[in-house]
Image (cartoon, grey):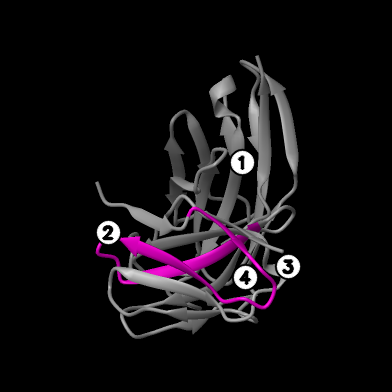
Amino acid sequence: EAAVTQSPRNKVAVTGGKVTLSCNQTNNHNNMYWYRQDTGHGLRLIHYSYGAGSTEKGDIPDGYKASRPSQENFSLILELATPSQTSVYFCASGWDWGDQDTQYFGPGTRLLVL
Amino acid sequence: GDSVTQTEGQVALSEEDFLTIHCNYSASGYPALFWYVQYPGEGPQFLFRASRDKEKGSSRGFEATYDKGTTSFHLRKASVQESDSAVYYCALGNGGSALGRLHFGAGTQLIVIP
């Protein structure tokens, strides 16, 4: 079964440190997305990608970078982590044409920045 | 810009009660509308979608009808069970503005009391 996996599942980081969250998909989807989830805000889009080598800014990109080295992998990078980035992060993959625009989510990464 | 509003932050029902979660959207054209469900500790799961006026989407006993006149896509279920307790997200996809991007509502937590 096609799947989206994320690593690590839990991460504790220190303020000012670098954090890399990884996502892998076996759906063979072109598009991949990074969201963060916070109480009262639902899911907010940070960065997304249309294919290997491409990254686009979402609605809340400040403080985050993204990297898409291959069709299967999409990383979210926090160069200088801050406590405000404590959250649950979800990766998703999907197509973008016709009725094939459903996104499929990974299990999430819980990040705590101290 | 495109947006989704979910009126209820939390809904508490007894088993076998009728469920309605309200979803209203703001977008140009004919966006695709989605419902996702998220169980504790998991990523959001696709429930169903609709893309045309009066189209009904359904899955697992849940259903919603696309209503362009009232810009709504309300989630309903005739008889809820304790296992339906989860967070439900309404989402909008508008290929004309940004292929593949989804805009999520803030989510509605459903608590079903046995």
Amino acid type for the residue under numbered disc 2: Asn
Which residue is pictured at 72% across the width and 64% down the height? A114
Q: Position of residue B49 (x, y in %)?
A: 44, 50
Q: Are marks 4 and 3 on the same chain?
A: no
Q: Are marks 1 and 4 on the same chain?
A: yes
Looking at the rendered image, the disc whose residue lies closer to the viewer, 1 or 4, is 1
> Is the magenta region chiefly helix, strand or loop?
strand
Q: How many marks?
A: 4
What residue is disc 1 on?
Answer: B87
Check disc 3: other Cα within 10 Å, few if <14, some if 14-19, many if 20+: some
The relative height of residue B111 versus residue A39 in the rendered view (above or below) is above
User: What stretch of residues is rendered in magenta?
Assistant: A9-37
Say if mark 1 contacts mark 4, CB within 8 Å.
Answer: no
Which residue is pictured at 52% across the width and 76% down the height? A77
Which residue is pictured at 29% across the width and 66% down the height? A29
- Mark 2 — on which chain does it sit? A
- Spatial CA distance of label 1 from label 3 is 25 Å
Q: Are marks 1 and 3 on the same chain?
A: no
Residue A27 badge? 2
Looking at the rendered image, the disc whose residue lies closer to the viewer, 4 or 3, is 3
- Mark 4 — on which chain does it sit? B
Amino acid type for the residue under numbered disc 3: Pro
- Spatial CA distance of label 4 from label 2 is 27 Å
What residue is disc 4 on?
Answer: B2
Check disc 1: other Cα within 10 Å, few if <14, some if 14-19, many if 20+: many
User: Viewer-proximal residue, B37 or A75?
Assistant: A75
- Spatial CA distance of label 1 from label 2 is 25 Å
Residue A83 badge? 3
Q: Position of residue B91 (x, y in %)?
A: 56, 56
Indicate which disc, 1 or 4, sits on the residue closer to the N terminus.
Answer: 4
Q: Position of residue A59 (x, y in %)?
A: 62, 76
The relative height of residue B79 versus residue A40 in the rendered view (above or below) is above
